[in-house]
Image (cartoon, coloured by chain):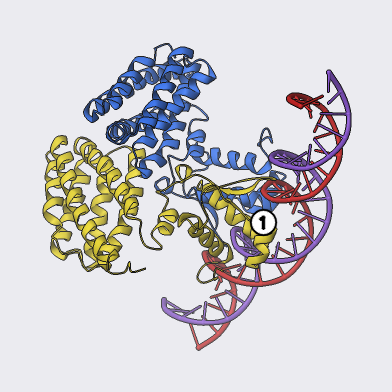
Chain colours: A blue, B yellow, C red, D purple
Amino acid sequence: MPKTSGRRVRGAIFDYLGELIVTGSAGVGDTLPGEVETAERLDISRGTYREAVKMLAGKGLVESRPKTGTRVLERSRWNLLDPDVLRWAFAGRPDPSFVADLFEMRSVVEPAIARLAATRRDDEQAQQMREALAVMAGKGLRSQSGRDADRLFHETLLKACGNEVMQSLGASIGAAVAYTTLFKKRAGGLSRDPVPDHQRVMDAIDARDPDAAEQAMTELLLLARQDTDKALQDFISPQDRD
Amino acid sequence: MPKTSGRRVRGAIFDYLGELIVTGSAGVGDTLPGEVETAERLDISRGTYREAVKMLAGKGLVESRPKTGTRVLERSRWNLLDPDVLRWAFAGRPDPSFVADLFEMRSVVEPAIARLAATRRDDEQAQQMREALAVMAGKGLRSQSGRDADRLFHETLLKACGNEVMQSLGASIGAAVAYTTLFKKRAGGLSRDPVPDHQRVMDAIDARDPDAAEQAMTELLLLARQDTDKALQDFISPQDRD
DNA sequence: GATTATTCATTACTCCGACAAATCGAACTG
DNA sequence: CAGTTCGATTTGTCGGAGTAATGAATAATC
């Protein structure tokens, strides 16, 4: 039974259903109970329940048809990179293979973005990235302003690549990064200084050197992945006792 | 004013609003008129209108808040690879820069997929790809069965890469590119034999040679892009007379 | 005079109840 | 046995009413 904490009713039901589906509690192909029944069980109006379901339908998670009911679509129809979907995927204990897949995707896309940004960035963007990096160096990632600067750094990098399609992946990747760093923090990690590897990327982009930018970003991701792997292991192993 | 042709009311309004937003008629940052007003103008009930808007919200196109109203989000928040969004984007005349971005994205992701598939594919997948390629060679892309084989070839390749995230990404990009080939056909192109470049990819994956697979896929995409560029130019230039 | 607290109007949010339309499956008919 | 009809089930659509959040104008306070 979902609680109405934080958002409004629809938001709570939306999250409840989304997590139910993404975590696998509602298996692919299953048809969830009828609207009237479910709405009554959750003690909400049918209209509000329907709106929550329609939002899930917008993400490609479910499909509704008269008589047949609302059924969970196959995973290939899902938008796995949707920020909400990612949030639900990381809600419980994250699936290590999913995290691995995510990093593999990043290690393909992000170096390419850095490469493009190196040739296409304008001076203003470079300046903004430099400033963000300076804040990161000063405050560190433990403070909110430091994390904001980190986000700004990557957002600007994304803008600088000048490819709208890749840019639309930014929000997704950003969400993925946020959740992995969350686990790093929970696991007590988050010790390594993130500035040097970011600095290498910055230098390459400053110098408009695509090869160096791609290389530097690849290294950055490699380090990030090592940290996450370690954190994930620490996080999972002491608890998996069932 | 949208027509209720085909789908139901909500579907029609959903399409109407979606196209309005994606084609730019409703600019980014704009807040669309209030629910009551719009629902009345479109002669539909307010609940149905809200459901359509909520589906758009699920795709990240709009965001609703009390008092402020419903406003169109920035393009970076959109899910540009969503099938519906693509349909709307290609509804009018396709934006050449968008097509360029799409192919750039593809040239990053698909070679990586081919590389991964080369090492991770199992024998059954390789067999299926071989058979599909044989059908392509026999029937050509003009027949339905030939196009089905082409689709099966790429679908199997995606599965073989063994990364669910990249699989989902590849599928979306594939769907997007399919729209551009729609224009290829309209423009009367579709002349080049697609088998040799596919065969090179196939050989590399058969040999479990990641470097060769990546290279072969890069070449395939280069040729595809040349065809599309040419077709797109033929398609656009004779009509842009306003 | 600038800042803070308050009121107010606007907008989306939630609820209720009813009927319509589509569709699957079973009963029926040839 | 094949095809058709019919009925039950489920989502779809509608209208209306009241609630809650929020931004802005206004008043109070320092």
Residue A240 image offset from top left, x and y in percent: 47, 20
Residue B179 sits in quarter: bottom left
The residue at the point 44 percent across, 23 percent down is A150
- Check the residue under mark 1 and report the chain it is in: B
Query: Looking at the image, which is closer to me, B61 or B67?
Result: B67
Helix, strand or loop under label 1: helix
Residue A66 image offset from top left, x and y in percent: 57, 62
The residue at the point 39 percent across, 29 percent down is A99
Question: Is residue B153 left or right of B43 when viewed as pictured?
Answer: left
Name above or below for residue A138 compared with residue B175: above
Residue A37 image offset from top left, x and y in percent: 67, 51
Residue A230 sits in quarter: top left
Question: Is residue A169 left or right of C9 when viewed as pictured?
Answer: left
Residue B199 image offset from top left, x and y in percent: 12, 50
Name above or below for residue B184 compared with residue A90: below
Residue type for callout 1: Glu
- Judging by the rendered image, the residue that carries numbered circle 1 is B35
